Amino acid sequence: MNRTLWRGATVILSATAAIFAMSTVATAATTTAQVSVSAAAQQRAQNFWTAERMRSARPLDLPVVNASPSQVAVGAPAVVEPMAFPNGGSAWTGGGNVVKTTGRVFFTYQGRTASCSGSAVTSTNKSTIITAGHCVKLGGAFHTNWTFVPAYNNGNAPYGTWAARLLRATPQWVASENISYDIGAAVVSQLNGASLTDVVGGQGIAFNQARGQNMYAFGYPAASPYNGTILIYCSGKVFNEFLGTGGIGMTCNMTGGSSGGPWFLQFSEATGNGVLNSVNSFKYNFAPNWMFGPYFGADAQNLYNSAQVA
């Protein structure tokens, strides 16, 4: 049986077929692909997220999947150790556009203040954010009071607090919270008459890319040993997830709150620009230093296409 625990909202799953279908029991479950947020609710969200509430928000933790090492299939990485190029998790001090386009996501989940991470991407509406599916909907319901704070810094919002007017996720995540499709999107309203990416810029995004490339991951982990106050990154050559989700993995010790943070191909440390190609999604209980993200295929592309014109 699946168990959902609030320990920074950690989701722990049994090692059964349900490993990859996070079917959380909910009496008010929704299969609606998106939820629209009224102007009044957007204003309430902006007013709700004071600096004090941001600092006290508990991280919506990465789903942790219970499995045993004996289940690791042939072809899984025998050893994935940090070396000179890979970074397993430390503060990003390189600057560049990634500082502005990456932000902390705040929302209310089951009556609790919670946080994830997300990234502003280039889009037709100049207002689209890509994050994890469980950062927009979990336990059968979409989150409320959803806001995006780019370049968050210890309660400070240097580029403002952007309220979502629309939340979406892949159909597989909406229907059954399938971890293979843990991808979400938000469309935010203008702030002070300006659109999001006109203010902070937007990262590129790509789909159906070759596996096994070098990537950089970013996020605002808020569970120990991190506290959500600064931007953290990991980097390295990714490997294929080995128990059937079809995702990709990286050596990375980021914790809860980093969910939804961007994974970049072709990332430039000089400019802070890259091509978004996955997000922080989940970990296995037997490999806490591996992070996994969904492969961005056709379903991710359809989600992005629908969000960027909404």
Image (tube, grey):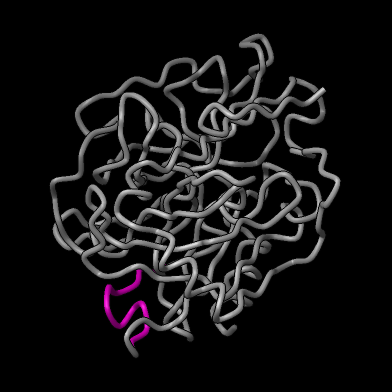
Of residue 91 and residue 241, the one placed in the foreground of this image is: 91
Question: Is 36 located above or below residue 217 in the figure?
Answer: below
Query: Picture coordinates of residue 128 (x, y %)?
Result: 48, 73
The quarter of the image holding the N terminus is top right
Residue 275 found in image quarter:
bottom left
Residue 55 found in image quarter:
top left
Query: Picture coordinates of residue 43 (x, y %)?
Result: 47, 75
**Magenta part of the protein: which range?**
194-204
The reply to whether the magenta stretch includes residue 196 is yes
Residue 91 found in image quarter:
top left
Query: Picture coordinates of residue 141 (x, y %)?
Result: 72, 54
The reply to whether the magenta stretch includes residue 76 is no
**Could you tell me which residue is drawn at 37 percent across and 38 percent down?**
221
**Could you tell me which residue is drawn at 63 percent across and 77 percent down?**
306
**Could you tell me which residue is drawn at 56 percent across and 64 percent down?**
185
Question: Is 274 located above or below residue 228 in the figure?
Answer: below
* Total tally of numbered discs in the picture: 0
The quarter of the image holding the C terminus is bottom right
**Could you tell me which residue is drawn at 61 percent across and 52 percent down?**
133
* Residue farthest right in this picture: 27
Of residue 142 and residue 244, the one placed in the foreground of this image is: 142
Query: Picture coordinates of residue 260 (x, y %)?
Result: 48, 50
Of residue 240 and residue 166, the one placed in the foreground of this image is: 166
